[in-house]
Image (spheres, grey):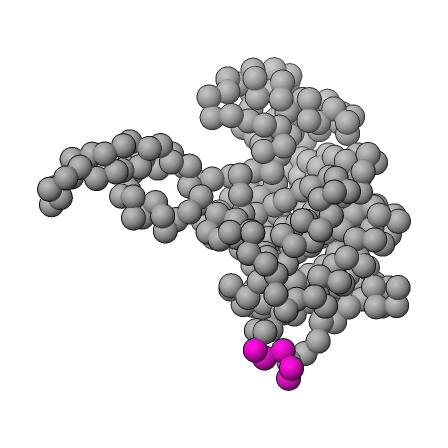
Amino acid sequence: MLVIADSTRRQIGELFELDDLGPQPLAGFAAPQRAWRVLGESSVVSRFEALRSGATPLIGRGEELALLSRGWQQAKAGEGRVVLISGESGIGKSRLAAAIAAATEAEQPVRLRWFCSPHHQDSALYPFIVQLERAAGFARDDTAENRLAKLDAVLAPGSPSDDEVMLLRELLSLPNTATALNLSPQKKRETLFAAMLSQLAALAQSRPVLAALEDAHWIDPTSRELLDLMVDQVRRLPFLMIITFRPEFHAPWADQPHVTTLALSRLGERRNGPRPRACRQCATR
């Protein structure tokens, strides 16, 4: 059990789920000190939301936000777009993604969010597992049966096959009652990817989708394979996907016609720095 002081609690924001233990007698302190038990890493919010206030105004990024808005309009018309936002830590990548989410909130798009973690770079499909658990509404005290029912409900619109359901249950470490699939590892991966892509397409049938994958520089290799397929699929759907990352990450999709690149510079360097490079479709509409 890991217990932290109230001062540490204020520094970590909402990065972790905590249990308030109340005032506790601690060595070296004359009076009891408030303490918190760490339950686990939070899967509800992004690192930006956990450590900062999303209510702070967005200043000096009007051009970038306008480009995202144009991409959203094109996505709503059925012309899927991907926007790559690169920049150093703390420069405003997540803040910009939050701003377009706030600007489109009244339109009630389908929201999808995947967060890569520096602690899970070797955990296959970690961002997608967490997002699926969050979409299904898993609770810490759910039984296995409850989780199975919740997962089946969230998968229903995509009409997955029995094999796909089994693989998605396996992905989330849920029990399977059916006979194990006699598939090679490569075939299992292909079938699982197909199931997850089908879910995305099914979501886009109801309403346009606004999606964000944050901190791609921490993405695990298997998630990277799936992301490659998603970027290709988006062009055929009413879908705006935002991918944020630091400059050291190589984004192989930048030259695709439906992809826009925004390389953020510090606001004080803006006058002499490079302007955002937009895709031809975004720049001309």
The quarter holding residue 244 reads: bottom right
Q: Nearer the viewer, residue 15 or 126?
A: 15
User: Is the magenta region chiefly helix, strand or loop?
Assistant: loop
Question: Residue at 42% across / 37% down in the picture?
Answer: 17
85 relative to 186, above or below: below
Specify the segment rendered in magenta. Answer: 268-272
Q: How many marks?
A: 0
Q: Along the horizontal axis of the image, is 51 left or right of 86?
A: left
Quadrant holding the C terminus: bottom right
Residue at image location 58% in from the left, 32% down from the top: 133
Residue 270: percent from the left, percent from the top? 63, 78
Residue 42 position, x and y percent, is 47, 39
Q: Is residue 26 magenta?
A: no
**In this picture, residue 258 sits left or right of residue 272:** right
Residue 225 shows in this picture: no
Q: Is residue 38 above or below residue 161?
A: below
Which residue lies most toward the bottom here? 272
Give the residue at x 11% y 42%: 30
Q: Position of residue 16 (x, y in %)?
A: 42, 41
Quadrant of the rendering where the N terminus is positioned: top left
Residue 112 shows in the view: yes
Give me the residue at 17% from left, 37% from top.
32
In the image, 170: left or right of 2? right
**In the rendered view, would you say 263 is above or below 6?**
below
Return the x and y of residue 243 as percentages of the image width and height. 66, 56
